[in-house]
Every structure is written in structure tokens, then in C-alpha cells.
Image (cartoon, rainbow, N blue to C red):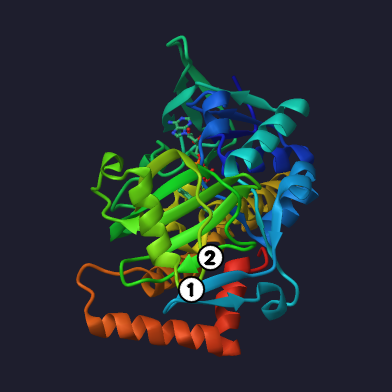
């Protein structure tokens, strides 16, 4: 099998890349280890930056998102038992975020890709990539029937997430350097059948730890609270979860609307960057090259931003045979990645309690939150980063 751009992974990065290339007249093939059904029901991100929404709309994948997504012009920071609104729209000249779940984004992108003749091989697991320094790299993969196949291409896009195989094709130490930070806490996430407790998202700081009140639809709510990453969901009855959440977001009479919890899970928090994001004819995009703690809601958005830069570079190559933009891909993408790393680290450090945290740290965090809630300059820094920088 042969194509121009071989893509490993049908997550947001791989699907967006494939469709943008298609619109620019460039052929691609995606190999994806999971089934379509599994991809379409995995619950992950929910907050889309203005630029991601604009990109989805521009490529013709924004219709349902426009209809069903929730556009938010602000969010609430709660600390010291009180809520303080961060007016994103006012602080960023009208930029907003849209709450639209990642699996709905994926449903829209997969349907669009297949409708427009895209080649997506589901249940096809990449096992290795060869020939990266030649002009005919090859992706080796196994099909669901256990057959071994090869996809030869001009370029490989490694869009296979944090646990994929592409990154390993960049020799560690010799070429690749990985930067890690593991946080000493995780997020306990729930999905509940309940009405929204608030019109906008709530990011809460409490001496027992962070909590996030978010939404998925008028009758399904997504909520998280900081927990021990080694904790077990069986330790948490529904009553205990609601009490913990209510304690962390309570104050000034605010009451959470509760309901039946139908999904529980614990995710660890970590920051990771791999440098460079290119080696020979392999280009990494999205979680394959970096991950951020979800506090800043940046992961999916960074994947979209990488792909925007990569698609432009590949398009320039195919129209002029110039490798200038391809050569600039890694440094260009990494500038945004490190900005997002800083923002995600800042939000995480400001809002979570650390095990080693002292009373001094608690008071310092509250002073920092007070600054963000009362200074327009500080709130603008938060708002500009949260709605997302314009695409490069
Ligand atoms: C609980 C949670 C909440 C989050 N909230 C937000 C948020 O609000 N906003 C935000 O922007 N981000 C958020 N994120 C992060 C976001 O989900 C990821 O950053 C995003 O999915 C990255 O997209 P991707 O395409 O790079 O990788 P992925 O979505 O991981 O896609 C990679 C694909 O590659 C496939 N694959 C892996 N290995 C192979 C292989 N060997 N062969 C073939 N295919 C392979 C996988 O099956 C997968 O489908 C959140 C994440 C979590 C876990």
C-alpha cells in the first residue's frame, strides 16, 4: 500500500491532519489500533479554544458543534467560599470557549473523513516505522485478522497519542530528549445524570483540594476532584463523592445539583514534552509529542495547533518542493507547546493542594487567586491563555 502521508492514529490530531491535507489535494492513509466504536465512546476532553472551533468550522466539521456545543464567555474561580467570574470575552476582545466533548468531535471528524473518501484503517496497529532517513519511509502494521502489512509513504505523521509507537522511532538520547513532570495527585472524574449546577465551568480551590464542575449536555454533567492517583474508585460511594464535591465548591449558599453517577475514573496528572518533534521524515503531533495536566484544558487544542502548522508545511512542500516550513515545524510547534506547558503548570500549581504544602503555601495560593480575581492585568493573562493564543 502507498500514499503521500501515512498517519498513525485516528485521534483529533490524525483525523484533523488527514482532512486538512485532503482539502489541500494531498492523499493520506490513517492506521488506527482501536475500533471506530471504541474511539467514539472514549470520554476525554471537553473544552475547545476559539481557534480549534474556528479550524473545525473552516474545514467543514463544525456544523453539529455549532448546534450542540455550549459557548461560554467566562468561567468561575471559587476560593475562600466565594465565586469570582473571569469574563473571558471582555478580557480577550470577544474570544470564547466552546464546551463540546472530544468523542463528539471525533464522531464528526470520522464521519466527514469517510464521507469524503478518506482511508481510515481501524483495528490496524502500527508496530514500527522504518526508513525515516530515506524518502520512502514505511509504516508496518497488523490488521485485526493478524496479517502484517506495510504502508509506504513520502512522510509519516505520528499522531498516536501518549502511548503510541511513533515517538520510539526517534532515537532517545542521540536525537530525542524527553522532559517530564509527574504531579503527586490525580483527578477523580465522574459523569452524572443531573441538570447543570452552573451556567459556566467552576474551577474551585479548597483546602481539601481542587474541584472542577463542568458540563456535557443539559442532562449529563462532568465533574472532577483532586485525589490520590493510587486511590481506588471502589473506595468512593456516590454519597461520598457528592459530599466531597459539595464541600470543595460550597460557600455563599452554592448547592450542587446531584444525580445518578454512571461513570467513575481516576486519571494521573503529568506534563511531558519530547524534543524535537521531527526526525527525518517523521513528524510527531499532539499527545505523541507532549501532554499537559488537564487543568488548563489544552491537550486537544495543542493537537489541533500542531496539525495546523504541519498541514501548512506539507502543503507548501507539495506545491513548491520547498522543505523550509517542514524544517521549521518542530521549533514552531514547540514554542506554543512550552507556552501551554507553562500555563497548565501555573493553573495546576495555583489550584491544587500539594502533599508537602504548608499553611504558608495555602495562604500564598489564596493571595495569588485574590490577585487574579481583582487585577484586570492578572485576569487578562489567565483569560488570554485559557481561550488560547491565535494559531501561528
Ligand atoms: C480526563 C481528560 C480530560 C481532558 N480534558 C481536556 C480538555 O478539556 N481540553 C483539551 O484540549 N484536552 C483535554 N484532554 C487531553 C486530550 O484528550 C488529548 O490531548 C487529545 O486526545 C490528544 O489528541 P491526539 O490525537 O494527539 O491523541 P489521542 O486522542 O490519544 O489519539 C491517538 C490515537 O492513536 C491510536 N494509537 C495509539 N497507538 C497506536 C498504534 N500503535 N497504531 C495505531 N494507532 C495507535 C489511539 O488508539 C488513538 O485513537 C483531556 C484528557 C483527559 C484524559
First of labels 2, 1 by sequence position: 1
Q: Looking at the picture, does residue 235 appear above or below residue 214? A: above
Q: Looking at the picture, does residue 364 appear above or below residue 206? A: below
Q: Is residue 388 visible?
A: no
- Specify few, some or many for label 2: CA neighbours under 10 Å numbering under 14, 14-19, or 20 or more: many
Image coordinates of residue 15 in percent, x first then y, are 63, 38
Q: Which residue is mark 1?
A: 78
Q: Is residue 16 visible?
A: yes
Q: Residue at x 44, y 46 (%)?
A: 190
Image coordinates of residue 363 in percent, x first then y, are 32, 85
Q: Residue at x 65, y 62 (%)?
A: 199
Image coordinates of residue 237 in percent, x first then y, are 33, 43
Q: Is residue 235 left or right of residue 160?
A: left
Q: Quadrant of the N terminus?
A: top right
> Which secondary structure, mark 1?
strand
* Label 2–label 1 contact, CB within 8 A: yes
Image coordinates of residue 372 in percent, x first then y, are 51, 83
Towards the viewer: 155 or 81 = 81
Q: Residue at x 49, y 26 (%)?
A: 34
Q: Looking at the picture, does residue 274 appear above or below residue 40? A: below
Pointer 2 residue Cβ closer than 8 Å to ligand 1? no
Q: For residue 202, which numbered disc appears in the image?
A: 2
Towards the viewer: 32 or 147 = 32
> Which secondary structure, mark 2?
strand
Q: For residue 365, which numbered disc appears in the image?
A: none
Amino acid at each position: 500500500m502507498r500514499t503521500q502521508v501515512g498517519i498513525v492514529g485516528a485521534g483529533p490530531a490524525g483525523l484533523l491532519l488527514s482532512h486538512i491535507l485532503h482539502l489541500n489535494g494531498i492523499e493520506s492513509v490513517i492506521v488506527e489500533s482501536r475500533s471506530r466504536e471504541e474511539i467514539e465512546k472514549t470520554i476525554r476532553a471537553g473544552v475547545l479554544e476559539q481557534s480549534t472551533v474556528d479550524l473545525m468550522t473552516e474545514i467543514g466539521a463544525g456544523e453539529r458543534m455549532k448546534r450542540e456545543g455550549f459557548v461560554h464567555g467566562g468561567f468561575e474561580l471559587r476560593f475562600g467560599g466565594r465565586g469570582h467570574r473571569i469574563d473571558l470575552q471582555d478580557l480577550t476582545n470577544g474570544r470564547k470557549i466552546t464546551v463540546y466533548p472530544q468523542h463528539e468531535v471525533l464522531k464528526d471528524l470520522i464521519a466527514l473523513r469517510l464521507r469524503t473518501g478518506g482511508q481510515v484503517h481501524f483495528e490496524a496497529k502500527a508496530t514500527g516505522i522504518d526508513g525515516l532517513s530515506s524518502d520512502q519511509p514505511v509504516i508496518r502494521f497488523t490488521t485485526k485478522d493478524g496479517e502484517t502489512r506495510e504502508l509506504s509513504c513520502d512522510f509519516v505523521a505520528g499522531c498516536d497519542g501518549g502511548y503510541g509507537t511513533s515517538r520510539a522511532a526517534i532515537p532517545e538520547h542521540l536525537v530525542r530528549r524527553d522532559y517530564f513532570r509527574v504531579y503527586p495527585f490525580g483527578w477523580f472524574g465522574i459523569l452524572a445524570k443531573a441538570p447543570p449546577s452552573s451556567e459556566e465551568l467552576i474551577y474551585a480551590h479548597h483546602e481539601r483540594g481542587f474541584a472542577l464542575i463542568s458540563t456535557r449536555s443539559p442532562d449529563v454533567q462532568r465533574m472532577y476532584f483532586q485525589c490520590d492517583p493510587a486511590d481506588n474508585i471502589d473506595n468512593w460511594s456516590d454519597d461520598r463523592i457528592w459530599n466531597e464535591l459539595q464541600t470543595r465548591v460550597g460557600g455563599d449558599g452554592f448547592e450542587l445539583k446531584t444525580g445518578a453517577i454512571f461513570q467513575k475514573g481516576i486519571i494521573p496528572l503529568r506534563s511531558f514534552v519530547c524534543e524535537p518533534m521531527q526526525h527525518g521524515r517523521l513528524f510527531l503531533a499532539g499527545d505523541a509529542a507532549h501532554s499537559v495536566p488537564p487543568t488548563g484544558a489544552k491537550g486537544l487544542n495543542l493537537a489541533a495547533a500542531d496539525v495546523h502548522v504541519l498541514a501548512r508545511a506539507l502543503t507548501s512542500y507539495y506545491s513548491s518542493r520547498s522543505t523550509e516550513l517542514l524544517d521549521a515545524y518542530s521549533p514552531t510547534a514547540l514554542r506554543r507547546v512550552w507556552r501551554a506547558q507553562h500555563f497548565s503548570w501555573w493553573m495546576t500549581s495555583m489550584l491544587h493542594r500539594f502533599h508537602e504544602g504548608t499553611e504558608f503555601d495555602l495562604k500564598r495560593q489564596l493571595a495569588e487567586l485574590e490577585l487574579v480575581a481583582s487585577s484586570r492585568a492578572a485576569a487578562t493573562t489567565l483569560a488570554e491563555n485559557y481561550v488560547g493564543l491565535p494559531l501561528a
